[in-house]
Each structure stands twice: as structure tokens, then as C-alpha cells.
């Protein structure tokens, strides 16, 4: 967090991914000035299908979604996702969506549910699906894949997203930007911003900040460093 603050990162939102960690995440967020979300990731479904109901202080619902690589039946994944979407809608909170190898299934589900306020996290679909997700009400967020050599697919999608729906993220600790090695961290956001700006040929820091605050609310300032 000290390194992130030094390069201008103003705030952090940490998604919950499994119910067993929600209490600890809430406590850490309150201690260190982070924002947090509560959800059950598809990878956690073999252990838990919990849907958050005690939201105290949460800024979003998620990370939740669909994943074609986890071996959990689609009907289970879709049921749990729809329950998350319903909680987010009732609470007036945005949702943080995960989609991997399921871009044929997610847009129809979103159309059935109705407009969804939230973000498609670490977008892995093609430019051809951007319009469908935007029409569903979503922002699209891009991570370290945009920095890899030959990253044509993610950068084509970056260029397709309307300016007001574009976001970036680290997906820490995964997807460390090229050519950095090791675990990703919040300070690496700057490298991702530069890759997205280069792809679109425009300065975007102010736009990305405004988009994040429009979705999650204004960050009051820099979070205090841990310790």
C-alpha cells in the first residue's frame, strides 16, 4: 500500500471470493481504509454456495460469475450468480462479475435478469461482445493481459469500450504486467493504465478515476498504509 500510494493510487477495492474469508476481509478493510466486496467466486462453489446477506460496509457484491473451467454444473453456477445479482439489485450496489470460458452463456443470463449495474472484471471476451455487455449496463475492466507482447485481443476490446464504461484493475496477485515478474500488487496499476492509454491513443487517468467513482462512489483520499 505504501508503494501504491507513492505512484498515485488513491484507493483499493478488494473483492471477497469465499464466505469463509468475508469476516476477515471486512476487518482488514476497516483497519486499513480499503473498500471491499462480498461474493462467492465460481472456483469456491465446490466448497460453498453462500450468497452475502450481511453487507455492513460493503461497496459491491462479488466477485461472482460463471467459469467453464471449474467443473461445477452450469445450473448451479447460474443459480448462485442470479442470487448475487438479486442481492446487489436490492441493496443498490454494483456487482463485480467473473466470466471465463462462459461468454456464450453470460449475456443471455444478463438479458433475462435485466439491467445490471457493475463491472465485468478482467474482461476476457472479444471486441465483438463488448456492445452486449455495455447494453446490459456493465463497465468493462482490463488487467495485466493488456501489457503482454502481441496482446491483440484484449487491446481490440479496450478500443471498443465506450470511454465512460472503461475501467482498469490489477487483479492482484495474478496477472502481473509485462515485463514485471512475481506477484501483482496495487502499485502495478500504473503500468496497466499506460498500456490502455497507448492502445486508445489518449490520456485516461482522469476518465478512469471518474468512471470508478461513478460506479463505486468517491474515494475520500489515500488509504493509510498497513502497520
Image (cartoon, rainbow, N blue to C red):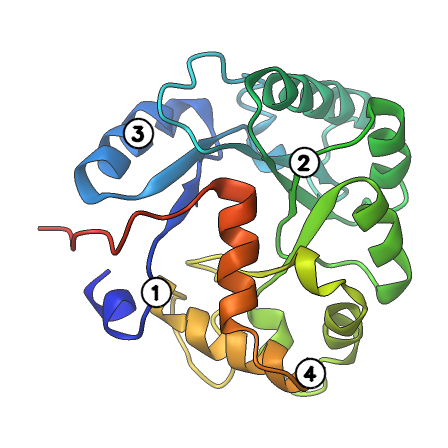
Q: Measured along the vertical axis of the image, is residue 183 above or below residue 54? A: below
In this view, the mark in front (4 or 2) = 2
Q: Residue furthest top?
A: 53
Q: Measured along the vertical axis of the image, is residue 166 above or below residue 86? A: below
Earlier along the polypeptide chain: callout 3 or callout 2?
A: 3
The answer for how far apart the CA atoms under marks 4 and 3 are is 36 Å
Q: Which residue is mark 2?
A: 117
Q: Measured along the vertical axis of the image, is residue 12 above or below residue 89? A: below
Q: Secondary structure at mark 1?
A: loop
In this view, the mark in front (4 or 3) = 4
Residue 29 drawn at (x, y percent): 27, 37
Q: Secondary structure at mark 2?
A: loop
Instruction: State the residue at coordinates (31%, 23%).
Output: 23
Earlier along the polypeptide chain: callout 2 or callout 1?
A: 1
Q: Which residue is mark 3?
A: 26
Q: Secondary structure at mark 3?
A: helix
Instruction: State the residue at coordinates (48%, 86%).
Output: 179
Amino acid at each position: 500500500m505504501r508503494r501504491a500510494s507513492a505512484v498515485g493510487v488513491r484507493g483499493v477495492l478488494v473483492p471477497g471470493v469465499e464466505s469463509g474469508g468475508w469476516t476477515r476481509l471486512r476487518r482488514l478493510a476497516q483497519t486499513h481504509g480499503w473498500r471491499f466486496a462480498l461474493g462467492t467466486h465460481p472456483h469456491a462453489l465446490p466448497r460453498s454456495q453462500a450468497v452475502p446477506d450481511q453487507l455492513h460496509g460493503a461497496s459491491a457484491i462479488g466477485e461472482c460469475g460463471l467459469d467453464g473451467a471449474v467443473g461445477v454444473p452450469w445450473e448451479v453456477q447460474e443459480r448462485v450468480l442470479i442470487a448475487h445479482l438479486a442481492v446487489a439489485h436490492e441493496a443498490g450496489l454494483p456487482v463485480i462479475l467473473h466470466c471465463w470460458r462462459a461468454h456464450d452463456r453470460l449475456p443471455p443470463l444478463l438479458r433475462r435478469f435485466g439491467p445490471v449495474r457493475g463491472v465485468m472484471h478482467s474482461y476476457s471476451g472479444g471486441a465483438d461482445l463488448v456492445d452486449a455487455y455495455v447494453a446490459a449496463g456493465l463497465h468493462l475492466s482490463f488487467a495485466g493481459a493488456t501489457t503482454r507482447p502481441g496482446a491483440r485481443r484484449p487491446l481490440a476490446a479496450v478500443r471498443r469500450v465506450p470511454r465512460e464504461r472503461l475501467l482498469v484493475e490489477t487483479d492482484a496477485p495474478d496477472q502481473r504486467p509485462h515485463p514485471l515478474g512475481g506477484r501483482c500488487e496495487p502499485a502495478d496499476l500504473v503500468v496497466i493504465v499506460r498500456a490502455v492509454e497507448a492502445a486508445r491513443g489518449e490520456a485516461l487517468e482522469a476518465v478512469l478515476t471518474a468512471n470508478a467513482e461513478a460506479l463505486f462512489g468517491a474515494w475520500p483520499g489515500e488509504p493509510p498504509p498497513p502497520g
